[in-house]
Image (cartoon, rainbow, N blue to C red):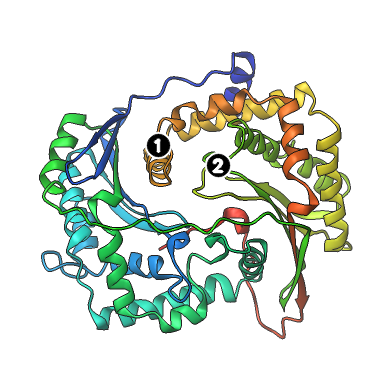
Amino acid sequence: MPRRSMLLLLLSLLPLAVPAAPAVYERQLANGLEVLVKPDHRAPILTSQVWYRIGSSYEHAGITGVSHALEHMMFQGTERHPAGSFSRIVAEQGGEQNAFTGSDYTAYYQNLASDRLETAFALEADRMRNLSLDEKAFAKELEVVKEERRMRTDDDPQSLVYERFSAAAYAVSPYRNPVIGWASDLEQLSLEDVRGWYRRWYAPNNAVLVVAGDVDPDRVFALAERYFGPLKAETFTPSKISCEPEQRGEKRIRVEVPAKEPYLLMGYKTPSVGNASEDWEPYALEMLASVLDGGDSARFSRDLIRGRQLAASVGAGYDAFERLPGLFLLEGVPAKGHDAGELEQAIRAEIERLKTEPVAASELERVRTQVVAAKVYQRDSLFYQAMQLGMLETIGLDWELAETYVDRLASVTADQIRTVARKYLDSDRLTVAVLDPLPLDGRQHATNPTALGGHGHVR
C-alpha cells in the first residue's frame, strides 16, 4: 500500500489528534523586532525568514504595486553588499533564497545548512535599513515588474478575470487592488515612492524574524541581538483601514478577452479569524470548502466532473487567516458542450444542498481525516512551519493559532457547516464574474490553475 494511503488508513482508525509540535520560543528585542524560533532537529538545516507588516492592502491609490516593486529592489544590494553579492553569498553557502509579496505582508527567506544562520542574519540586517536605491537599477527593475504583470495578468485570461472580479467584489477594501499593482500606477511609480515606502515600513519594529530548524534558541536570540539589535526603530502611524460596507445584492460582471475557453469565478463575502462574529465560523468555512473540493472523492469532483460531466475543472477556496474580511471563492471551467451558466447553476445547487442537508457523518469524518493527514505532511516542511508562524504574527494574530489550527478544524460539526452556509453563502453577498472568450486570432494564452490562490506574487 502507498505510504500516503497507509497514513490515511491509520489516521482514520485513531482519535483525531495531531502529534505535538516542537515548542516555539519567542523574544522581542529592544528595538521592537519580534523573534520566533521553532527548533526541529530532524535534519541539519534551517529556514530563516524576515516578515514585514506591509503589502498591497496598505497601499493607497496612485502607488499600487509599490510593495512588490520594493521587494524587487531589495535584491539590488547595499554599500556593504553590492548588487549581485547577496545571491552569490547565499549560493556559495549552499543555500537558496527568495521573497514574496502578498496583500498583508512581504517576506524574505534563506534556506541553509544549520551552521550558516549567521550569514542569513548579516545579510538581512544589512538590507533592512541600508538598502541602495539607485535610479538606474530602479528603472530596470520597474520594467521587469511591468513585464511580469503583462505575462501573469494581462496575457493570462483567468488572472485577468480574477483581477477585475476583485475590483468588482470589493467596494472600498484594499483587497480590491492587485498585489502587482494597476498598470497605470506602475507607469507613474517613482523611486521616491519606493524610497519613502522603504524608510517608513522596513524597520525592526515592523518586522518578524522566524527561524525554524536544527538550531539552539539561545544562539538564535544572541545572533539576532548582535545583527538586528543595533538597528533603529522607525516612528510611524499605522495606516487607517477602509471597512468594506455591507453588500446589498448580487454583483455580476462579464469579461471579454481572447481565450480558449469560458471561465466562471464566484465569491461570497466572508469573515476571517480576526473579525468573525463567532470564533468557530472561519474553521467551519474551511471545512465547507473541503467538503466541496477536498480531493477526488469530494462533491465537486464526484458530481460535477465525473458524474454529470458539466465541468472540466471546478474548485472552492477559503483563507481563514487574512488581515481583513475576504471571500469564499468558487471557480470552474465548463466541460465541452456546456457553458458557464450551466456550471454556475450546478454550483449554486451544491451550495443550496449544504444549506438544507447536514453533511453526513461518514463524509465529514473523511474530510477530517484528510485535514489531519495534510497537517502531518506539512510538518515535514521547515519552510511551511516558519511561514505559518510568520504569517500569523504579521497579520496581527497570535502564532499559537498555528498549534491549535487542526484541532479547531477537526472539532467542526455538520450543524456548524450548515450554519455558515446559510449565513454567508447568500446571493446578497455574492459576486459573479464570467469570462466570455473572444477569438484568439492566432495568439496563445496561458490558463492559470491557481486563480483561487489570491493575492501573492513570488519573485
Q: Could you tell me which residue is drawn at 61 percent across and 34 percent down? A: 283
Residue 261 % position (x, y): 76, 69
Mark 1: amino acid: Gln
| Residue neighbourhood size for the residue with mark 1, other residues' Cα within 10 Å, grouped as few (<14), some (14–19), many (≥20) | many
Residue 338 % position (x, y): 88, 61
Q: Could you tell me which residue is drawn at 22 percent across and 56 percent down? A: 234
Image quarter of residue 4? top right
Residue 119 % position (x, y): 16, 49
Q: Is residue 1 visible?
A: no
Label 2: element kind: loop
* Quadrant where the image shows the N terminus: top right
User: Mark 2 or 1 closer to N-term?
Assistant: 2
Residue 94 % position (x, y): 24, 50
Label 1: element kind: helix
State the CA–CA distance, disc 2 to disc 1: 24 Å
**Numbered mark located on residue 275 in the image:** 2
Q: Is residue 437 visible?
A: yes
Q: Could you tell me which residue is drawn at 62 percent across and 67 percent down? A: 167
Rendered view: 408 above or below 234: above
Q: Residue furthest top?
A: 14
Q: Residue furthest bottom?
A: 441
* Quadrant where the image shows the C terminus: bottom left
Nearest the camera: 289 or 268?
268
Q: Is residue 195 toward the left or the right of residue 154 in the image?
A: left
Nearest the camera: 276 or 33?
276
Looking at the image, is mark 2 or mark 1 nearer the viewer?
Answer: 2
Q: Is residue 53 toward the left or the right of residue 436 in the image?
A: left
**Numbered mark located on residue 415 in the image:** none
Mark 2: amino acid: Asn
Q: Could you tell me which residue is drawn at 61 percent across and 36 percent down? A: 277
**Numbered mark located on residue 385 in the image:** 1
Q: Is residue 368 toward the left or the right of residue 274 in the image?
A: right
